[in-house]
Amino acid sequence: MSTKKKYINREISWLGFNDRVLQEAEDESLPLLERIKFLGIFSNNLDEFFRVRVATLKRITNVNKEAKMNMGFSPKKTLEQIQEIVLKQQNKFERIYNEIKRNLAQKKIFIINEKKLTRKHGLEVKNYFHEKVRPALVPLMLDEDTEFPHLKDGSVYLAVSLRKLDGTKRQRFSLIEIPTHKLSRFYVMEQAKGKTYIILLDDVIRYCLEDIFAIFGYDEYHAYTIKITKDAEIDIDTDVSKSFLELIDSSIKRRSFGQPVRFIYEEKMPEEHPEMFTSITARLNIDADDNMLPAGRYHNFKDFMKFPRLGISDINSIEHPPLPHPATNPKHSLFSLLDRQDIMLHFPYHSYHTVIDFLREAAIDPRVKYIKITLYRLARNSNVVEALINARKNGKEVTAVLELQARFDEEANIRWAKQMQENGIIVLHGLQELKIHAKLCLVGRQLPDGSRKEYAYISTGNFNEDTARVYADDSLFTAHNGIISDIKQVFDVIELKTYVRQFQHLLVSPYFMQNQLCALINHEIDNARQNLPAYIFAKLNSLNDRAMIDKLYEAAEAGVKIKLIVRGICCLNPFLEQLHHNIEAISIVDKFLEHSRVLIFANGGNEKYYIASADWMERNLRHRIEVACPIYDPKIQQELRKIIDIQLTDNQKARYLNHPDGNVFVRTRQQPVNAQNAIYRYFKQAIPH
């Protein structure tokens, strides 16, 4: 990145983040299955990037080819840069995958294709095909006089050429969807001489093409992998006769017919079977402007996140079993504990069972009268929803604010909404123009004297026990009256559509958060000018709001020391010639996804701490209901400070953000520090033995 550019292009910055994921796949010190998992994450990330960001850029250029984005970047030029960078990353990806395959082979684990099958393994694959695979296949014949089939977004297809060798050279084309929604992408064959052999479902189908098309009597079969990615934006209509849930539901159905934004094909296909390639792309209305990307034999590497574990210790990941919080005891009431102290959980280091226990206790405690909760992304088999339903069955008033516009979770959230409503839970939704991204829970109890006492849970992450195993988040349990009062007002805003003039403790967007953050930064600027302690620490997922970036530049220019940890997008340039001595910015990409947002302000020596659901992005600060919560408990402040200090000394997994030479690792002469391993040890040592 340039040392003179004031702002970094958002899309290019994101591709830099995904390159950091690819660096993890390249890291030879990691167990092989961990490296394979990072290949899967890289692939899944890129799919979403094309479905959302590239689709948005294409929409803009279709309307106005000369348009500029809010930091002055050209969408058309950005699309060209994306194409160039993605092709380079794809080549790097293929190289890493082939290297991992060689390393697996050294461990006597072989990923083979249909051409490498022995006679014995061939019979085994045929049996598996006829028993499990064949019933899941629906070949689609591509005849000129029939309508071209609707291809699913993100599914992988085999484009098959069928040819007669009777002198007529007659051929037909077919598409076969690889049924990974029903079957594993991987088939592990019987061991032979201590060796493990794995074949992909794609190649099982290739091996049995003659069986699939036996009735036609063709002589030659050639198959190539293709995949289409579509615009994932949902356009919500304005039919006032429908509920918001119905509008979202119908919009999701239309999304499957979105415009193509990427066409991936096996690179040999245009050369070896140009007629089939031309026919398919023409009938899909795809051309070079639609990001046609040549790739290897296998697409949808996200399936590799579920690569068979195989039980071989030195290729599997090192596990970090979640730890109990030292203050909690499953046999004791969490409400009684919260009457005495605040508690902060740090996932995935701490067990998520404490959150489920909190909700389950609320569900059965006869003194609990109501539960209010905001839900954004839920686990596949949600214990959170189960606890809420049990609470309602036990006579509690339960209100769930379920965000229907959580991208790619819309369908799941519609199902959850219906299930909760069927069980008597009051289900509310965000507004069409205002997503609810805050992570809040409020439990109200009636005490023996008739008074009410409330308990709150505020988090940087979702109520999701699945992602809590791999997402690094911070969550506060508190009975602090001031915080409770503000949370009640947040729920009033959502439930009653009321306007709140001010919150006393919480920073809440889209109402006041940005102004209050700027006020906190201005206070640091004033202190710096008076030679008082002045510094800011911000840990974020993304930083691309221009006003916040400009405010940080202003602070750095005034002498405020700024340290940033930003996992993903960062449009701030920490290497600006006149400011780099006051701004440090790193990104940590490791086994756990860094998802927490933590803010620390020097405040003249009396530090202020916040955890937040919001990144410093325009959408979070202006178009969502988000919450940043102050941390008042000195012990928890020390905990957060310890975690941050560890992360700032990471010299194994930290990279300098927007370095002129790309993703350069932070390397120091100090002892090696892997922040995530060190944090786990820190919490493990805190458990009484």
Image: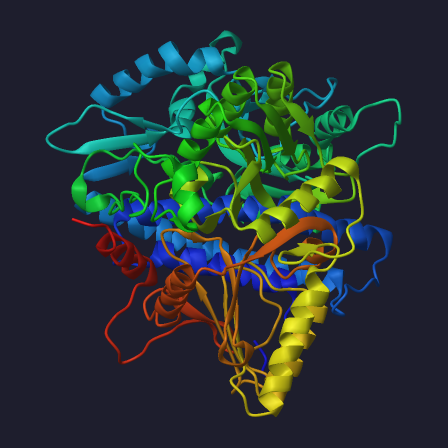
Residue at 46% from the left image edge and 10% from the top image edge: 135
Q: Is residue 189 above or below residue 513?
A: above
Residue at 42% from the left image edge and 56% from the top image edge: 22
Q: Residue 351's image quarter?
A: top left
**In the image, is 616 to the left or to the right of 315?**
right
Expressed as whole percent of the image width and height from the top left, the position of residue 255 reads: 71, 32
Residue at 16% from the left image edge and 48% from the top image edge: 689
Furthest-front residue in this view: 449
Q: Is residue 48 above or below residue 639?
A: above
Which of 241 and 219 lies nearest the eye of the viewer? 241
Coloring scheme of the render?
rainbow
Q: Is residue 643 above or below residue 42?
A: below
Expressed as whole percent of the image width and height from the top left, the position of residue 190 reads: 20, 23
Residue at 56% from the left image edge and 18% from the top image edge: 395
- All told, the count of numbered labels is 0
Q: Is residue 121 above or below residue 521?
A: above
For the N terminus, which image quadrant? bottom right
Furthest-top residue in this view: 215
Which of 631 and 575 lies nearest the eye of the viewer? 631
Expressed as whole percent of the image width and height from the top left, the position of residue 301 reads: 45, 41
Expressed as whole percent of the image width and height from the top left, the position of residue 622 reads: 74, 56
